[in-house]
Amino acid sequence: MTFFYAPKKILESLVLTLIGCMLTQAAQASESDWSWDVSAQATYIWQSKGNFQAPYSGANSLTSERERSYSFSSTAYVGLRIPLLGELYLNPEAIQGKPLSGLAGMGSFSNGEMQKVGGPTLKPYLPRLFLRRDWALSEDAVDVEAAPNQLAGSHAIDLLRLTVGKFAITDVFDENRFSHDARSQFLTWASTAQGAYDFAADAQGYSIGAALEFKRADWALRVGRFMVPEQSNGEKLSWALGRLHGDQIEVEHRHEWQNLPGALRLLLWRNREAMGAFQDALNKFLPGNPQVGAVRQLQTKSGFGLHWEQAWSPALGSFLRFSRGDGRTESYSFEDVDRSRQIGLNIKGLAWSRHEDNIGLLAIANSLSASHRQYLAQGGLTFFLGDGRLTYRDEQIFEAYYNWAAAPGLWISLDLQHLLNPAYNRDRGPVNLMALRLHAEY
């Protein structure tokens, strides 16, 4: 995808502007106060799956019997503003849980928190440690309140922002205020980002790299490069950033419709990884069970995503997402989805005098490429899928939740999911799932 790379003159202009801002602010800087903030969250999700019809099952199938699952996470958000340097953020976290069917059998897994789970024993780890530095490009500013990984203060409207360190790529790219966080919004994994966006990440969903954002008026441009895991869905990241990497570029336009906010986003991404191609596995092993892990080599995977979100009233907002990957190679960090279409609604409880409550409604259709389908139909396994054979049909997810603000800083949610054609197999399902979520912020 040669169009992915920004023209050399644009990159040179951005670098020169960044250097100029650094020198100017360093010259004008005076003593300022240090500031800091600490907050935390805890989320418990219990989920149950009912029985469903399945004439056959494979090594990576969703179990057709009734199952129960849970996940628990606890996170501290520590922020420190350092004069002249920027803002340093640290997020120690602990998580535990038990996934449905060993985290197999669904293109979009039913609990987005499960990507972080390492087992039924509480596991501490460090998902984020990063530095954020802003350079103002104008005197216009807006005051922001303290929030997780956001210190209170005055932020320039037009700015350059550099974020470097360990964090999730989706902390910066592919934002969606209605569908982005399984701890407080929709649960299904594809709802936390563009469904076909195989963004670089370790097994918990985080990477090490840098993102540069340019914001002026209603426009924003973001570029970033990040480390990829050494192995598919592995925990160790590769430090060979020049040879193995995940790149992305995003253009955003924010607007207002009748004084209500909206946004349009175009995301392009390109990964360079040691991946197996489905057609290579088919060519090597047929007749027989193809193995994508046996044909891995250095190659490129790319895709794009389109996103529109809009508030229609103080109580109603909606979004549309469409994303597509090239579908040639195995999913390396995210889910088994090559194309995804999403539509969702968010309804606040203003009409029934519950201002902090909200309802979410979501429909998703996920697809696989032709070679991906043939690979599974011939008995191939991926990290998440493998029924032994396949009668293909798009995987479809319908989700609804009610989020009840039970007390200040405490939300209780009831979530329902109806899954058609689990793992893209019309011979199996449908599957009904129910979840209860407790989410606290303090």
Image (tube, rainbow, N blue to C red):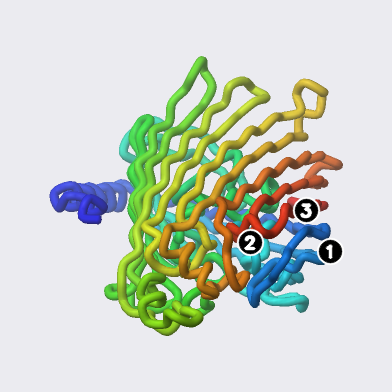
Quadrant location, the N terminus? bottom left
Q: Look at discs 1 and 3 and give the one toward the viewer.
A: 1
Q: Residue furthest left?
A: 9
Residue tagged 3: 433
Q: Quote the CA–CA distance across marks 3 and 2.
A: 13 Å
Q: Nearer the viewer, residue 359 or 87?
A: 359
Q: Secondary structure at mark 2?
A: loop
Mark 3: give few (<14), some (14-19) or many (20+) Cα within 10 Å.
Answer: some
Q: Secondary structure at mark 1?
A: loop
Going from N to C along the chain, the mark reached first, 3 or 2, is 2
Residue 100 x, y percent position in the rendering: 74, 67
Q: Which residue is depicted at the point 45% across and 64% down? A: 372
Does residue 388 sit above or below 83 in this rendering? below
Please indicate whether residue 234 sits to the left or right of residue 441 in the image.
left
Q: Which residue is depicted at the point 33% across and 73% down? A: 244
Residue tagged 1: 66
Q: Which residue is depicted at the point 31% across and 39% down? A: 137
**What is the quadrant of residue 352 in the picture?**
top right
Residue tagged 2: 106
Q: Quote the CA–CA distance across marks 1 and 3.
A: 10 Å
**Number of numbered markers:** 3
Mark 1: give few (<14), some (14-19) or many (20+) Cα within 10 Å.
Answer: few
Verify CB contact (< 8 Å) between mark 1 and mark 3: no
Q: Amino acid at mark 1?
A: Arg
Q: Nearer the viewer, residue 260 or 371?
A: 371
Does residue 206 sit above or below 192 in this rendering? below
